[in-house]
Image: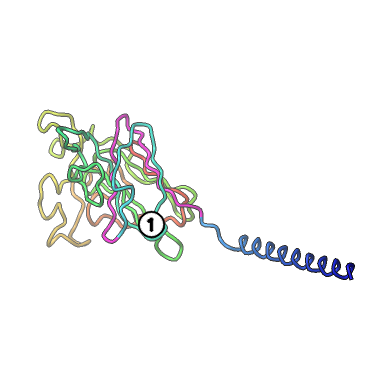
Amino acid sequence: MQFSRVKKMASLSLRFTLFFTATFLILCIFTEATPHHPEFILTLVNNCPFTVWPAIQPNSGHAVLERGGFALNTLTHHSFPAPAQHWSGRIWARTGCSYNHGHFSCATGDCGGRLECNGLGGSSPATLAQFSLHHGHNDLSSYAVSLVDGFNVPMTVTPHEGKGLCPVVGCRANLLATCPDRLQLRSPPGHGPVVACKSGCEAFGTDELCCRNHYNSPQTCRASSFSEFFKHACPATFTYAHDSPSLMHECSSPRELKIIFCH
């Protein structure tokens, strides 16, 4: 009787052992078969010899990232997870920012006098990085650097571990040193140093230079001598509203996108 009970318990124990072993093996196989999606990181790097205040503006309907802005000291970086779903928007650097009498303002790229832009756009001129993350069947991330709204700091976008054509793009040249007189933005106005370089549209405001009204189409919106100044120095950037769409690059499943100021 005692022996029979022991035998039953041993059999039961063996069954439990086999059950848990099989379950463990199934879980292992399932884990191996399930594709692993590593976290997608956005990293902002400040290589400028001064503090910049990055700003992030989502397109309509998309989330505000990192409250829309923060300070980034020279030779430091700030990394954060990219949205897991489709997201599009733009990133730029604000420069010459300060608090005066309790009011925050920036010489370039200012977003309504706020440290955290919270979805607000910035004032031009400013170098812009534009993004559309997680779109298409192959988890594409599109990116480009635009000088359509002028220039304030050199900027590049560098993808890491993506598939397909994933070039480094942007503008490494310091155009403040060569900006034509008529496009210069100085701070303080008139006698201060050049802090940004305006687009032809901002400097002169004509429909033709701004690609407005009759000129708002790929057939009528053309490069100007002002956009050609930017294009000659930084050919891998958009320099007018209907510039070549091929400048927007599509990289499949990058592990990280680095936005580098003063690369």
Q: Position of residue 240 (x, y in %)?
A: 22, 52
Compared with residue 42, is residue 47 higher up or lower down, i.e. above or below?
Answer: above
Q: Quadrant of residue 19?
A: bottom right
Q: Position of residue 68 (x, y in %)?
A: 29, 48
Q: Which is nearer the eye, 36 or 125? A: 36
Q: Residue at x 11, y 28 (%)?
A: 191
Mark 1, residue position: 133
Compared with residue 106, is residue 25 higher up or lower down, i.e. above or below?
Answer: below
**Residue 48 lies within the magenta run:** yes
Disc 1 residue type?
A: Leu
User: In the image as oriented, which residue stretches furthest toward the front?
Assistant: 1
Q: Residue at x 88, y 70 (%)?
A: 4
Total labels: the figure holds 1
Sort mark 1 into few (<14), some (14-19) or many (20+) by Cα contacts within 10 Å.
many
The answer to whether 75 appears left or right of 241 in the picture is: right
Q: Position of residue 76 (x, y in %)?
A: 38, 34
Compared with residue 20, is residue 148 higher up or lower down, i.e. above or below?
Answer: above
The answer to whether 158 appears left or right of 152 in the picture is: right
Q: Quadrant of residue 107?
A: top left
Question: What stretch of residues is rendered in magenta?
Answer: 38-61
Q: Which is nearer the eye, 74 or 171? A: 74
